[in-house]
Amino acid sequence: MAIQLTSLLIIMILSFNSYGQTISSSLPSQARNKITDSTQVVELAKKEKLFLYNNAATPPVVSFNKYKNEWKLVSTETNNVVGDDCKYPNGCIANHYIVLIIDAETGTIKNKQERTTLQPVYE
């Protein structure tokens, strides 16, 4: 009984480093995650041609979900539309949204949603 308890204690001591973390999780964050910050998320979206940004009023929003280990990027582009696409005499404002969910471990796009809405201009 005492030998089993001692060997269990030795295994527990060896499996933890001096900071109380397990040895396997004490790797640098870059070795564990391919995407480590928001600039890498934006660069990946630009490379895949899925990044929209033409107006300082609607900057892109990047957030990290630590529970799912994934990044979320919401980018928006606005344009004025006059003519066939818009039936209002003063035109419309087209808002085009792209929402990307990117896996932080692999750097792959898990989900992509695109949506365009038209808002009439009454002025």
Image: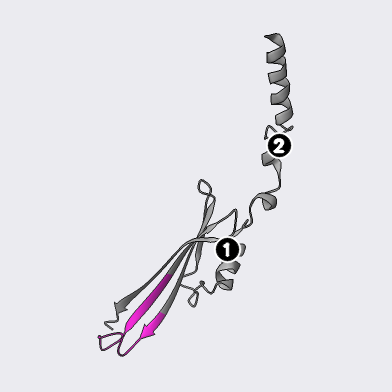
Q: Secondary structure at mark 1?
A: helix
**Image-quadrant location for residue 46:** bottom right
Q: How many marks?
A: 2
Please tell me the numbered disc located at residue 23: 2
Question: Dividing the image into 4 quarters, which one contains the C terminus?
Answer: bottom left
Give how far across and how far down residue 121 sits, in percent.
Answer: 29, 81
Q: Is residue 74 left or right of residue 33?
A: left
Q: Which image quadrant: the N terminus?
A: top right
Horizontal and vertical percent for residue 112? 45, 65
Judge by depth and name the residue closer to the eye, 62 or 8.
Answer: 8
- Judge from the rendering whether residue 41 lies leftward or rightward of residue 15; answer left or right: left
Q: Residue at x 55, y 69 (%)?
A: 45
Nearer-N-terminus badge (1/2): 2
Residue shown at the point (31%, 85%) measured from the top left: 85
User: Label 2 crowding class (10 Å Cα cut-off): few <14, some 14-19, many 20+?
Assistant: few
Q: Is residue 71 above or below residue 122?
A: above
- Residue displayed at 55% across by 72% down: 48
91 magenta-colored: yes
Whole-number angstrom distance, CA of label 1 to CA of label 2: 28 Å
Q: Return the residue found at the far top.
A: 1
Q: Residue 120 lies in magenta, yes or no?
A: no
User: Pointer 1: what residue?
Assistant: 41
Q: Report the front residue among 31 and 2.
A: 2
- The kind of residue on which mark 1 rests is Val
Percent across and percent down for residue 76 are 45, 71
Q: Residues in magenta?
A: 79-97
Q: Are marks 1 and 2 in contact (CB under 8 Å)?
A: no
Note whether 50 is above or below 28 in the view shown. Answer: below
Q: Tell me the tag on residue 63.
A: none
The chosen color scheme is: one colour
Type of amino acid under label 2: Ile
